[in-house]
Structure formats: structure tokens, C-alpha cells
Image: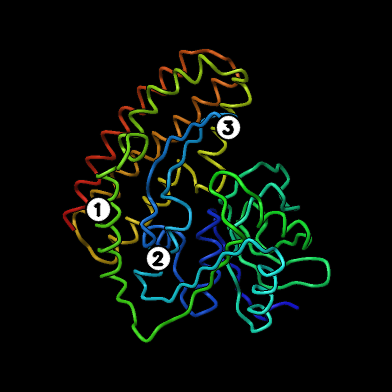
Amino acid sequence: MKIENIKPFNGQHCETTATGTLLQQIGIDLSEPMLFGLGEGLGFIYWNMKTMDFPFIGGRIKPDLLTQNLARNLNLELTVKETSSQQKAWDQVKELLDDGQAVGLKMDCYHLEYFSNPFHFAGHYAAIYGYDDENAFLIDTRQQCGQVQTSLKSLARARAEKGPMASKNLYYTLRKTDIKFDLEKAIAAAIRNNAAEYLNPSITNISYKGILKTSIEIVKWFNTSKNIEGEFKQAAMLMEKAGTGGALFRNLYRDFLKESYELLQLDPLKSGYEAFSEIAELWTNVSQLFEKVSQTKEIQYIHQASDILKEISGKEKRTMEILTTL
């Protein structure tokens, strides 16, 4: 069984791709940068736990929040459900599919059979649009080839996996309400909200404070790492290529601000776009330096990356302050 005439969203980031597919099914067709921006998606986190192989550097807000923000800003009805029962979790999704409703799933991509280089990450999203006796048919990112399939057994494992960022077989749907959205007002509200959240971090390892902290922590990481080559290579890949849209999501936010300026013609948006154009290049420089670290094991590249991170922290803080004036 497959939902007929499903239009796959062609995206680079997993949550915007899954949610974008659900939106297109209900007649809302927006660009990926616009979805990321309306979801108030820009953020930062440096996360290091003893149970982790190496620190995680993330450039967006917490998993699940992006779609919640997007639904609020577009006046949509978002239904999110979790259950510890794998059978119940599948039965509920199957019922929605049988009714012609595409469904967003949150999973650990390690178990998905179409991933050529599987790794544990339990904050991965895809949209499911069909199934047969053995397989599930999903829509994933451009990097994962869009329309893909995986066995029902592997899907169950992916949905039920535990660990950082995991949920209990989480799935979600989106529906229109009687209240239509005003895109221009939604854009301005989303930017102000994202900027305010960014400028008021609750702890020092997130937002611009987290970037500044990371500039110090990566030196400690280098000095204590048991696998410099593997860890910094993986970190560089996650920052630049693994569904971030490049430059740790800054390319997506840059393009969102450009699209917003073209629509609203407000000076803070132009300033923000120009600033994030520079900031995105700096993030790419950091990932390139991480690559050099993995290749050479030379600490000089860590110190160069540290200096750039200090610069990024200040630039992002100043730019978000400008965007609060919308």
C-alpha cells in the first residue's frame, strides 16, 4: 500500500524534509530555508558526556521543537504521539497510512538499511508514505536518495532505539485549521522568537555562549582524544554534510533571511542576510580545519579553529541583536 500522488520534499535536512513532505500533502509548498526559519531552527549546542565517543557539535534547536514552532507559526494542528509498545506504534501509523495520511517518524538512523554509512543518531526524521508485507516506504533527505525503503523489522528497531535524543516510537501528523496564516507576519514573529531565544541561553554550552565555550573545549578534546583522525573527521562531516545544509545550518538560515528580505524589504533582514553569508563561510572554515586536524594531527589547526569560533560567537550575537528589532 502506497499513498498515491505523494510529492516528496527535496531537502537536505531530515526534519524539514519529513515535515515538508507532510506540508506538501496538505497544499503548503515552501522552500527548505523558509521551513527552517519559520521553525525558529537556528541554534547551537556543544554536548559532551562520558557515555559519548566524542563531543557533539550541533547547529540547531532541540529535536522536535522545529516542527512544533513551524506548526504554531503557520496555524496548523500538530499531533505528536509516543508509545513504548512497538506493536501499538506500528498499528497507529498503519491506520493513518491506510486513511491516506503521510506520517512523520523520529528514529535512530543506525538501523535504517538505506544508510550507506550507518551511525547512531536517534534524532533522525523521515516521512512514511506506504508499506507492504515486508518493507516500509519512506521519504528521506536528498543525500539518502529521497524515496527509499527499509524492512519493517529495521524500522521497528529504528523507532524504538534508546539513547541521546531518542523518543518512544514518536510519530506526528499535520493538518490545516480554520485559521489561515499570514506568511509575512509569521516570518517576522519567527525571526524575533529565534533571536530572543538565541540571545538568552539557559546554560553556557548553547547559543553564542556555547560557541565561545567550544573554542576552549576543542583544545581539551584534542589533547585527550584517543582517535584524533576518526573523531575530528566525523565531526567535520556532521557539521558540513550530514543534513545541515552546510556550514552547520548557517547556509539554510542565510537563505531564509535572503528570501524573507525579498518578500518584506526590511533593512534588518538585509543586514542579517549579509552577516550570515560571512558567518556561514567561517563555519565551513572550521569544518575544513577539523579535516586538517584529522589528516595531520597537528594542534595548530585546532588553535586556528578556536580563533574562528571566538569570531563567530561575537558575529552571531551581534546579528541576532539586529534581528530582534524587526
Residues at marks 3 and 1, CA–CA distance in whole angstroms? 43 Å
Are the residues at dot 3 and dot 1 in contact (C-beta closer than 8 Å)?
no
Tell me the amino acid under the disc marked 3: Thr
Give the percent coordinates (x, y) of residue 189. Answer: 26, 64
Q: Residue at x 39, y 28 (%)?
A: 214
Chosen colour scheme: rainbow
Of 114 and 255, nearer the camera is 114
- The quadrant the N terminus occupies is bottom right
Query: Closer to the N terminus: mark 3 or mark 2?
Result: 3
Q: SS for tag 2? A: helix
Of 172 and 301, nearer the camera is 172
In this rendering, which labeled residue sits more in front, label 2 or label 1? 2
Residue tagged 2: 70
Give the percent coordinates (x, y) of residue 150. Answer: 76, 59
Near mark 2 (Cα within 10 A), the count class, few <14, some 14-19 or many ≥20, is many
Near mark 1 (Cα within 10 A), the count class, few <14, some 14-19 or many ≥20, is some
Tell me the amino acid under the disc marked 1: Lys
Are the residues at dot 3 and dot 2 in contact (C-beta closer than 8 Å)?
no
Are the residues at dot 2 and dot 1 in contact (C-beta closer than 8 Å)?
no
Q: Residue at x 37, y 49 (%)?
A: 42
Q: Which residue ends up furthest to the bottom in the rendered image? A: 178
- The quadrant the C terminus occupies is bottom left
Q: What number is the disc on residue 270?
A: 1
In this rendering, which labeled residue sits more in front, label 3 or label 1? 3
Residue tagged 3: 51
